[in-house]
Amino acid sequence: MSKSFGRKKVLDKLSLDVSEGQFLTIFGPNGAGKTTLIRILSTLLRPTSGEFFVNGHNSKEEAIEIRKSIGVISHSPFLYDELTAYENLTFFGSIYNLAPGKLEQRVKELLRQVGLQFRMYDRVDTFSRGMKQRLSIARAIIHRPKILFLDEPYTGLDHNASRLLNHILNDFIRDSGTIIMATHDFDRGLRISDRVLILVKGKIKRDLQTKDLDIKKFKNIYQSAISGIYA
């Protein structure tokens, strides 16, 4: 699969398989194509060439089916500021056709889970950056997706909110969910995932199992993989 913006090639004949229940973290310098890859896999962008399958659905023909089985968390919360926290989650839950009675229960359950139950009727434009990000986490999992795509999901989260997200991700993997995350945070990415990629100029330079790595060893591998960029 490739993606170009004008003459600039961002992803270059990339090929990737991710197994069910796997937690894959993608590392790479700025401009490596990490965010573009996440946006394509979550059907927010189309590739210039090639195709991909998510949960058995072809990206060219079944984008709607793909969206039903995925959740997306990024540094942009994808929330409506003029709506309350409760209204935001109710709206997104209704898109996935959750039954009204079950939807209300699910909304309140998630607001408790992300620590926003006492602000559920407040407008989102009154929330801090960290509170919006916590609500964004709830938005992404309201329909119980099978796959999560994460693009720098810890941006704006304080220590407690980061621990909360770790807990949610651990539960998600334990329930056989699949996660693909793009981040610059070596320590966290190595600690919570079981596989890592190093993406450089739209190509996969290294594909590694985290059980074989410590932070020092990985930093050396990473520097070697990107060494040609700054030469």
Image (cartoon, rainbow, N blue to C red):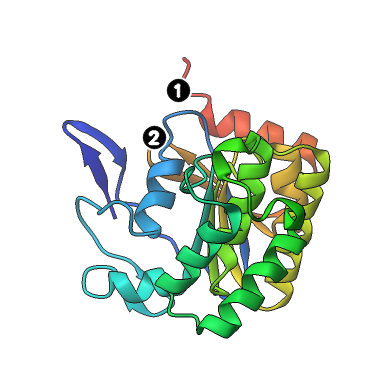
Q: Nearer the viewer, residue 140 or 116?
A: 116
Mark 2: amino acid:
Lys
* Residue sitting at x 33%, y 59%: 43
Most extreme residue toward the left, as rendered? 6
> Which residue was labeled with disc 1?
229
Amino acid, disc 1: Ile
Identity of the residue drawn at 61% across and 43% down:
132
What secondary structure is marked by label 1? loop
- Estimate the x, y position of residue 20 in percent, counting from the top left: 57, 76
Secondary structure at numbered mark 2 = loop
Furthest-front residue in this view: 121
Sooner in the amino-acid sequence: mark 1 or mark 2: 2
The N terminus sits in image quarter: bottom left
User: Does residue 188 show up?
Assistant: yes
At x 76% / y 62%, what residue is drawn?
112
Position above or below: 89 against 203: below
Residue 68 vertical position relative to residue 51 in the rendered view, above or below = below
Q: Are marks 1 and 2 in contact (CB under 8 Å)?
A: yes
Q: Quadrant of residue 123?
A: top right
Residue visible at 59% across and 60% down in the picture? 86
Residue 212 appears anywhere in the view: no
Q: Nearer the viewer, residue 226 or 166?
A: 166
Left-right relation of 95 to 212: left
Q: Which residue is mark 2?
A: 201
